[in-house]
Image (cartoon, grey):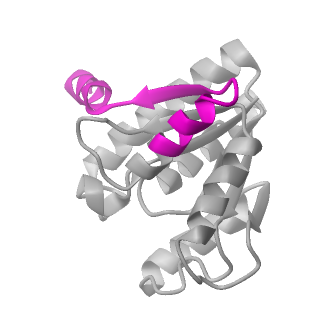
Amino acid sequence: MRIWLTGYRGFELNLFKEDDPKAKIIRDVIKQRLINLAENNDLVWVITGGQLGIEQLALSAALELKEAYNIKTAMLLPYEDFGARWNEKNQEVLSNLKNRVDFCKVTTNNKYQGPYQLKAYQQFILQHTDKALLVYDPEYPGKPSYDYEAIKSYQNQQDYELELIDFYDLQDAADQA
């Protein structure tokens, strides 16, 4: 199984540091979902982008489980200069993740030219994964609403599963921590 894991950007969660307690809770929830998938559905690939926030937390979680569950990780980026305008620390984190994943490529070999590259990226990911795990709550739209809507539209044409981690799931995990 190839799973697309994405969700909110760091700024949407007011998450700006890796050691933020919220990051640990989110990473733990993602890890538990990945463990469940690995134990029940033969999870093979966790595929995501490199966005600050959920995507980087997801890669971090998947890399922690990599050996124990034989999970492979892929970072697919929508364009060539992805992250180039980030500050040095964030670029370093992205570079570190690129070096640790099993596979890293861009879906278009051009620098950022326009939103059409992001739509092409979504379609590529949807066509090359079997399921999406989205950290997203439809009651609180944000950047992941574009992915959510793309997934919903894709489901009208293809058998494609969507699993959500919403704010209630995250709050439950925080309450139990």
The answer to which quarter of the image holds residue 96 is: bottom right
Residue at 25% over, 26% down: 168
Question: Which x, y percent locates residue 63?
Answer: 64, 46
> Where's residue 35, x and y in %?
60, 24
Q: From the viewer's perspective, is residue 173 above or below residue 120?
A: above
In the image, residue 101 lies at what x, y percent?
72, 56
Quadrant of the drawing holding the C terminus: top left
Which residue is at the front of the view, 111 or 104?
A: 111
Q: Give the range drawn in magenta.
A: 149-177
Asked where in the image residue 70 lies, by quadrant, the reply is top right
> Can residue 15 be seen here?
no
**Residue 67 x %, y %:** 75, 37
Residue at 61% over, 53% down: 122
Q: In this view, does 37 lie above or below 15?
A: above
The answer to whether residue 45 is magenta is no
The residue nearer to you, when weighing 15 against 165, is: 165
Residue 155 in the magenta stretch? The answer is yes
Q: In this view, does 58 lie above or below 93?
A: above
Left or right: residue 127 compared with residue 147: right
Quadrant the N terminus occupies: top right
